[in-house]
Image: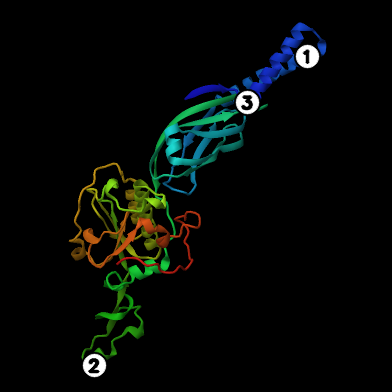
Amino acid sequence: MKRRFHLHLPGLLFVVLTISVGFAAANRPNNLVVWIFGAMLSLILVSGIISGSMMVRMRVSRLETRRAVVGSPLELRYLVANTSRFRSAFALRVDELIPARVRRGFLSRIAHGWSIRIAPGEKQVCDLVLWPRKRGVMTLERVRLMSFFPFGLVGRSLEFRLPVRILVHPEIRPVRRALLREAALGEVGGIRLARRPGAGEDFYSVREFRPGDSIRQVAWKRLGSSDELLVVQRSSSAPPRIRVLLDLSQPPDRLRFDAARGVDAAGLEERAIMMAASVLVAADREGHEHGLTILGFEDRPIPMRRGYWHRERSLSTLAEIDLSRDRTTVSVDTLSGEERAAFIVIQPGRIDTRNSPPRAWHWSATRIEDLLDLEDEPESIATESARPSPVPEVST
């Protein structure tokens, strides 16, 4: 923990004015000028003493930090404690001391956290908001608690070392819902029968009658050939399955795209990652099972699941992609025989079907405006866009 005094612009101007009045009082001693100089000097001393003694007993601890999403506000929470028994703390400001490289690379805006008053022995939760603009791992190390109470002239601050690593997920945009529905409900990845009974319509099996079963489920035709009362079980339908194949096997210098569109190779790869994240979030909201395979790196494919934690696992995998790594050539011919699902292949440059399973959907980051809704603000994972959209032309 470090303690420091601060003198910002209003305080500096007041100090300069005090020195000027002091010179005037020394050159031409006048009771009024001397009294004014003494009052101004007292304000500076009192401001430093009050703020310094007030901040001595303050403590800050960081609360649990959740993951962040590009384009969405990240709320950081801190527990500010006043351990003094008799003195309250006023006008406290909480800041993250972010290195310049992290600020330029990850953040677009920063909002400070404030607390008006903390009574003796009291603890308060203070919020601070950041706006990430780049995916990846963002490291924060130091937190500063500052106050310029009471006159705003001299401030006192305490710096606490509270290191934390925050994983910033890719930006999420609404997917054209009609396009996603057409890909998910196709002949390959459509609704099918599950291997368990449920509330479907197709026949699954016959079992003995149990107390609580509905009389409508009784197999009356079997009653004549057996003395036991049997019940017909219906099958349940399994949700559609979508596997997203993010094809990053081509190095950036070999990507084919139109340079006149104003996007470079690195920007197209980031767009492809954003498209993959948007498709996974949209599939999870629709109740589909989804999996992720990243081509070009020696990473194991994420199996088919659905639910909050599975979605977070997939997004975290996309957030941790290091595009500076060497690319490897991967063949996905065996994927078509491993699982029954709709394949959506997302490529940064122009569509290349040589490294894709048969009967797959191919989406290119060069046509991102036809696949994602880029007009609105970045979509929050907690909300869902219900706007119907037309189906654009894509290659299958």
Q: Quadrant of the C terminus?
A: bottom left
Residue holding disc 1: 35
325 is higher (above) or lower (below) than 357: above
Label located before the other in sequence (1 or 2): 1
Q: Please report contact status of discs 3 and 1: CB closer than 8 Å, yes or no.
A: no
Given the image, on which type of amino acid does mark 1 rest?
Trp
Indicate the quadrant where residue 55 lies.
Answer: top right
Indicate the quadrant where residue 234 lies.
Answer: bottom left
Residue holding disc 3: 9
Q: Position of residue 74 (x, y in %)?
A: 48, 45
Label 2 packing within 10 angstroms: few (<14), some (14-19), many (20+):
few
Q: Nearer the viewer, residue 313 or 294?
A: 294
- Where disc 3 sits, the SS reads helix
Given the image, on which type of amino acid does mark 3 rest?
Leu
Q: Is residue 187 visible?
A: yes
Q: Which mark is residue 224?
A: 2
Q: Position of residue 252 (x, y in %)?
A: 29, 47
Q: Kindly give the residue lying farthest to the front in the view shown.
A: 260
